[in-house]
Amino acid sequence: NAGVMQNPRHLVRRRGQEARLRCSPMKGHSHVYWYRQLPEEGLKFMVYLQKENIIDESGMPKERFSAEFPKEGPSILRIQQVVRGDSAAYFCASSPVYRLQETQYFGPGTRLLVL
Amino acid sequence: AQSVTQLGSHVSVSEGALVLLRCNYSSSVPPYLFWYVQYPNQGLQLLLKYTSAATLVKGINGFEAEFKKSETSFHLTKPSAHMSDAAEYFCAVSAYAGGTSYGKLTFGQGTILTVHP
């Protein structure tokens, strides 16, 4: 059973470009979480999605960031008009059900560098 | 709202020595607690979790943690460190916090464990 897949693993963008980060959850998992890890910091929750629905986006910056999890295909985290402060590691996690005690399985992350 | 504090951003031990990584949480409702490990340039891997079944939780790779409600702590220990334990360790909490908590994890700042030969 393949784990959580994220691509690309590394992404370099210039200021003002768009970044698209993809996450394929584990097989059978329909719950996806995105987290951001800034340098020297822990992971911070961004958004929680189920298929075709955004359930909790309380951690998403108000502008330039969006996320989706379509019926078919991976979850996408999209950052428009990137700035240097967006440089970070972005991790996706998935779980089979929603429960507070449910284990979230993490992907290897996408490391975004904005020049 | 819940929060996690990990005391000590860096811990250094000798191979074979006791490993103790500290985690204190804040939550107004019963929490679920997790320890994850992150190796360089990799994702997070679950070591163990507390789900209220037992206060002493055993995880993978010889790690264990004890939930102490009176001290609001969930410290991670391993009797004998191995070189392969060198990594960054994160404590996280999940707790119901109203309408939109939905199981999102709140992480501590992380502790980098160095193991010396």
Image: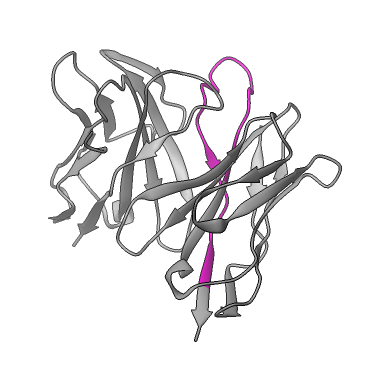
Count the marks. Answer: 0
Question: Residue A5: percent from the left, percent from the top?
Answer: 21, 40
The residue lying at 63 percent from left, 28 percent from top is B95
What is the magenta range?
B92-113
Residue at the (38%, 46%) spot, across then down: A36
SS assignment for the magenta stretch, majority: loop
| Residue B77 in the image, given as x and y percentages of width and height | 65, 60
Front residue of A56/A1: it is A1
| Vertical placement of residue A55 versus B26, above or below | above
Residue B42 higher or lower than A70, as above or below: below
**Quadrant of the snapshot with the N terminus of chain B:** top right
- The colour scheme used to paint the residues is one colour
Which image quadrant is residue A2 in? top left
Q: Which quadrant of the view contains residue B92?
A: top right
Task: Write the residue at 67% across / 53% down.
Answer: B23
Please, is residue B2 above or below residue B42 in the view? above
Q: Position of residue A6 (x, y in %)?
A: 21, 42
Residue A45 inside the magenta-drawn segment:
no
